[in-house]
């Protein structure tokens, strides 16, 4: 009897929880305006289905399989929908779009934030105008000599490991960090020449994992942050360390060169704000440039890694590219590196890089946006305001009608690209929030690929397989094995 009484509050409590859960399920599954959109049952009931898929690094591939099964509109959370058809690209990712970045971007940076994370339209377009000038084609060409120095380092790094497996994943990460570090921080990371990879790279690895925890488990995040355990503190401070590099580099830069040095890097261009813009504060500048180094490192290196892995699998494409490179005049090359203007418009080189970006986009995942006030009708279904809507280029790049045999590496498809292909192709995203570094990225990709292929041929190391290279993603993609060993040999 006394047992029964003491258990009563507990059973009330359990009963209440069950009732609440039942109510949630009924509301999310049967009453939601999104109820007619197909998707996994669990995804309709709870956001945790997607959160755990995401934390495991399988978000993009899982959503892709769902699109193949259910079509171009799928429900992936109680308040989240993913799309994969062209009409929606124009709707969500246009220049004039009314869809703003979703709240998840608030966790992606350390305050005061920067261009990548700003969600308000006005704040973003102001910053974008200010930075666009630094990223103009003319300014980029100005930086070419700085980039060449680092490509030269990469070549000698390859030259000293000929015939043996070389992990190009870490090599390309070091190289692209060296390049953007020099361009935006005026700083020599010396990634290629140091024994241990720079700490900056390890901190970048932690960044998106921390974002995931902060966004989805805020309570856990805050409890961790009050723990006095050194290793936990070190983990949590990864993101402020990234900004700290920026701050230190910035101060050293100003001390060495002053604010109006006329150097050929891009930091100078950010420092001397143009026209009507109010200049940025020092805090805004070093937060922004740390973010730019971040945005320009793993994106470029992952692209190069998958490109060279693919070339190793298809040696006939190496031969075709080398034949094309032979048409570039001898005077264009110095130290084995071509002038960008002479490789900028080579059709096969561009087609090959396009095809690698199509199959293995470095940012393959959902670019999350939010429906505007009043909601929107998308693919004939009304979606209420503040719903997270997105598309992933991993899936638009594999659309069967735009890209026949979507899983096959066929660079020649780009030699006469249809308008369907061009619309579906968005490795740099599209519209007002598309990649600001696209011209810089193309310069790096073309110059580096040309330089390496001119002198070296590349083949798979025994341990590098389709399995080891299968993609995991935490916003950005990476090979599952965390490395990619290839063997370079000199050609004469
Ligand atoms: C192959 C290399 C690259 C790829 C695939 C790539 C891809 C992307 C994508 C998909 C976005 C949209 C992100 C979003 O909506 O959340 C983006 C934005 C951005 N990227 Fe890149 N990126 C690359 C290289 C670079 C480089 C080298 C830089 C320069 C440092 C850069 C700077 C930026 C910036 C500043 C943004 C934010 C633009 C804005 O919101 O207005 N990216 N990039
Ligand atoms: C592929 O593209 C076509 C034409 O734009 C579209 O009708 C179709 O729904 C797309 N496929 C998927 C799975 O989204
Ligand atoms: C490549 O390495 C060889 C020996 O390891 C060296 O003699 C040669 O100078 C190097 N070439 C370049 C261009 O670095
Ligand atoms: C390119 O493709 C279009 C249609 O997609 C076709 O009409 C045209 O003949 C093609 N041109 C070449 C040179 O293959
Ligand atoms: C290849 O894999 C084997 C077994 O996992 C390992 O022992 C070996 O060190 C690896 N070799 C290289 C070159 O990575
Ligand atoms: C690093 C390297 O081997 N560079 C050589 C590549 O080929 C050119 C000729 O095209 C040589 O001049 C470079 O030294």
Image (tube, grey):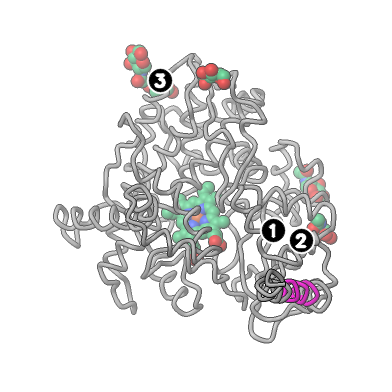
The percent coordinates of residue 175 (x first, y second) are 40, 37
Q: Would residue 6 be visible to someone looking at this image?
A: yes
Image point 62% across, 33% down: which residue? 469
Which residue position is annotated with label 2?
42
Q: Nearer the viewer, residue 207 or 188?
A: 207
* Magenta segment: 18-27
- Give the vertical position of 152 relative to 419 (above or below): above
Which residue position is annotated with label 3?
159
Q: Nearer the viewer, residue 348 or 31?
A: 31
Q: Label 1 vs label 2: CA separation?
A: 6 Å
Does mark 3 have its CB less than 8 Å from ligand 3? yes
Q: Nearer the viewer, mark 3 or mark 1?
A: 1
Q: Nearer the viewer, residue 350 or 278?
A: 278
Q: Is residue 171 magenta?
A: no
Question: Contact (CB < 8 A) between labels 1 and 2?
Answer: yes
Picture quarter with the N terminus: bottom right
* Quadrant in which residue 424 is drawn: bottom right
The percent coordinates of residue 128 (x first, y second) are 44, 69
Whichever of labels 3 and 2 marks the residue nearer the N terminus, that label is 2
- Left or right: 443 in relation to 376: left
The percent coordinates of residue 171 (x first, y second) are 43, 32
Image point 30% across, 37% down: which residue? 190
Residue density around tag 3, few if under 14, some if 14–19, many if 20 or more, within 10 Å = some
Image point 77% across, 49% down: which residue? 65
Which residue position is annotated with label 1?
49
Whichever of labels 3 and 1 marks the residue nearer the N terminus, that label is 1
Does mark 1 have its CB less than 8 Å from ligand 2? no
Q: Is residue 25 magenta?
A: yes
Q: Secondary structure at mark 2?
A: helix
């Amino acid at each position: 009897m006394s047992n029964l009484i003491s258990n009563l509050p507990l059973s009330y409590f359990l009963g209440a929880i069950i009732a609440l859960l039942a109510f949630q399920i009924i509301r999310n599954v049967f009453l939601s305006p999104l109820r007619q959109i197909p998707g996994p049952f669990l995804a309709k009931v709870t956001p945790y289905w997607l959160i755990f898929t995401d934390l495991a690094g399988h978000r993009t591939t899982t959503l892709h399989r769902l699109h193949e099964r259910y079509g171009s509109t799928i429900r992936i959370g109680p308040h989240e929908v993913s799309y994969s058809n062209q009409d929606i690209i124009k709707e969500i990712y246009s220049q004039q779009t009314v869809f703003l970045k979703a709240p998840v971007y608030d966790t992606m940076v350390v305050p005061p934030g920067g261009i990548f994370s700003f969600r308000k339209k006005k704040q973003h377009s102001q910053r974008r105008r200010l930075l666009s000038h630094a990223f103009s084609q003319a300014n980029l060409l100005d930086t070419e000599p700085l980039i060449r120095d680092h490509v030269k380092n990469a070549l000698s790094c390859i030259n000293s490991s000929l015939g043996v497996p070389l992990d190009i994943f870490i090599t390309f990460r070091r190289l692209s960090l060296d390049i953007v570090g020099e361009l935006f921080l005026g700083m020599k990371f010396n990634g290629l020449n140091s024994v241990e990879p720079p700490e900056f790279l390890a901190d970048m690895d932690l960044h998106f994992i921390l974002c995931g925890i902060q966004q989805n488990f805020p309570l856990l995040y805050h409890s961790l942050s009050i723990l006095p355990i050194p290793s936990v503190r070190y983990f949590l401070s990864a993101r402020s360390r990234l900004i700290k590099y920026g701050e230190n580099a910035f101060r050293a830069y100003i001390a060495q060169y002053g604010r109006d040095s006329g150097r050929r890097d891009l930091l100078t261009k950010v420092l001397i704000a143009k026209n009507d813009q109010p200049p940025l504060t020092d805090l805004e500048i070093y937060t922004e440039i740390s973010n730019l180094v971040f945005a320009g490192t793993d994106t470029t290196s992952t692209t190069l890694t998958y490109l060279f892995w693919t070339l190793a699998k298809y040696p006939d494409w190496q031969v075709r590219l080398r034949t094309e490179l032979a048409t570039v005049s001898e005077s264009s090359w110095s130290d084995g590196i071509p002038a960008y203007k002479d490789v900028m418009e080579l059709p096969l080189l561009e087609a090959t890089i396009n095809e690698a970006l199509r199959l293995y986009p470095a940012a393959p995942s959902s670019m999350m946006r939010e429906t505007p006030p009043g909601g929107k009708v998308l693919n004939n279904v009304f979606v209420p305001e503040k719903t997270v809507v997105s598309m992933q280029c991993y899936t638009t790049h594999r659309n069967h009608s735009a890209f026949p045999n979507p899983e096959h590496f066929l660079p020649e498809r780009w030699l006469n690209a249809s308008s369907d292909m061009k619309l579906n192709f968005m490795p740099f995203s599209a519209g007002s929030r598309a990649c600001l570094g696209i011209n810089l990225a193309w310069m790096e990709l073309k110059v580096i690929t040309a330089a390496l292929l001119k002198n070296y041929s590349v083949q798979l190391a025994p341990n590098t397989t389709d399995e080891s290279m299968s993609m995991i993603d935490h916003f950005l993609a990476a090979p599952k094995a965390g490395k990619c060993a290839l063997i370079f040999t000199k050609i004469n």
